[in-house]
Each structure stands twice: as structure tokens, then as C-alpha cells.
Amino acid sequence: MTELSTGNAVLAQGSLPAHDPESKRKVVNRLRRAHGQLAAVIDAVEQDAHCRDVVQQLSAVSKALDRAGFLVISSALRDCLEYPDAPGAADPEELEKLFLSLA
């Protein structure tokens, strides 16, 4: 298998670069936050909490998930710009559709 050097990433011929570790960390942190917030929503509903509290928690979960989605798309856009000819790379139209599905 042939390897290509692309600055600070080494790619196997015909593959995309590994995901940026910092971007991955940020996405995982947001998803973990959303996971905790969703658990709080479930507890609140089970304990018959006031609807205001439930809705506030749901809003927080929704925002955390949206931000994670936008971070994923942002990372894919960077990959698309850095490695436009890499096999399996998302095309701009696909990324636009994904972005708009979150908006």
C-alpha cells in the first residue's frame, strides 16, 4: 500500500486522513454533554417535574446535538478542502444538504 505525505498527515493511497483529534474530542464532548442532559430530561419526566424545567432541559439537549452536528460537518468541509480528490471524500453538494438538514 502506497502512502502519501500531506503535511502533518500520512495517508494510505486511496483513503481519507484520520479525523482531526481536536475536532473529534470536541464532538465527543458535546455528545457526552447531550447524553447527560437527556438523562436529566428523562429523570425530570419520571419525577413529574414542571414542564418549564423539562422544556429547558430539552432545549439544552437539542442545542448540544445541533452543535455536535455542525462540528462534524465543519470537519468534513475542512477535509473536503484539504483532500478534494481523496476517494470517499464528501462532495460539496452532499455537505450542503447535511448542513441544511441541521439548520
Image (spheres, rainbow, N blue to C red):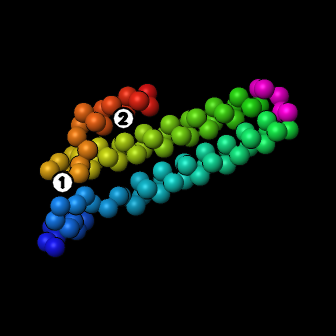
Residue type, numbered disc 2 = Leu
Image location of residue 97, percent across then percent down:
33, 31
Q: Tell me the kind of residue under disc 1.
A: Ala
Label of residue 71 in the image? none
| Residue under numbered circle 2 | 98
Image disc number at residue 86: 1
Q: Secondary structure at mark 2?
A: helix
Residue shown at the point (23%, 49%) measured from the top left: 89
Please give the name of the residue rendered at 36% of the width and 35% of the height, measured from the top-left corner.
98
**Main secondary structure of the magenta stretch:** loop
Residue at (82, 39) in percent of width and height: 46
Farthest residue toward the right?
47
When the figure is inspected, residue 65 is found, relative to residue 33, above or below; the finding is above
In the image, the segment drawn in magenta is 48-52
**Which corner quadrant of the image does residue 13 belong to?**
bottom left
Whole-Å distance between the Cαs marked 2 and 1?
Answer: 19 Å
Q: Is residue 49 magenta?
A: yes
**Depicted 5 relative to depicted 56: above or below:** below
